[in-house]
Amino acid sequence: MINVRVAVTGLLAAAAVTLAGTSMAAASTVAQPAAAAAEAANHAPKPHLTPLAVKWAAGWNSSNPQDLANLFVKDGSRYTDHAYNETFTGSAGVAQWFGNTKWAVPNGKVTVTNAIGVNNSEIIFWNFSGQATGAPHAFSVPVVTVIKTRGGKILTNDDFYSKAEVDRQSSLPAGS
């Protein structure tokens, strides 16, 4: 598991530094032992937050579902949470998903750690933390969101993270 995590982390770091214009030689220490990776982290590029990523996180951290829903194309947009296999359409559907999420994790917080935007696509790296309703413990999991835009609004939003990790950290039975 650790080797897989190091490999994935190395690939993501290489992609991020390549897109940020840093040489691969500077990023190659990510795949080396932990001490070298920690040293490389001290010299890594600062996280990049795109304007859309900032607005998107503010929408999720708001108490008003319209703050998030207004970022989406009114008709024809889609929000999919792949961990829970849930899909909602249109800005009204996004507002409904927001409400479902806030009910399930009332103190949920979105913290964006990095974002990459190219043309009409954006990848947001973030952490989702909070305590699920009825769960004995809080959780904090990394998430990757892939967004497609049209006319400055979100057309599609796909969240990818581990539901099993949310359950494990929350001390909930698997698949709850």
Image (cartoon, helix red, strand yellow):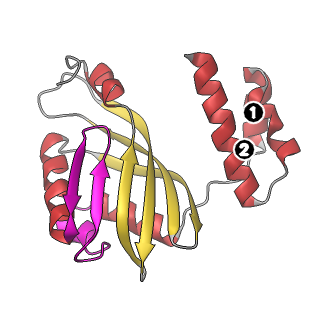
Q: CA distance from mark 2 to mark 1?
A: 8 Å
* Residue tagged 2: 14
| Chain part drawn in magenta | 62-90
- What element does badge 2 sit on? helix
Residue furthest bottom in the image: 151
Closest to the observer: 153 or 126?
A: 153
Closest to the observer: 138 or 30?
A: 30
Residue furthest right in the image: 25
Q: Look at 29% across and 76% down and name the residue there.
A: 73
* Residue tagged 1: 30
Q: Look at 15% across and 68% down and name the residue there.
A: 92
Quadrant of the rendered structure where residue 136 is? top left
Q: Quadrant of the N terminus?
A: top right
Residue 79: x, y in percent? 28, 58
Disc 2 and disc 1 in contact, CB within 8 angstroms: yes
Quadrant of the rendered structure where residue 46 is? bottom right
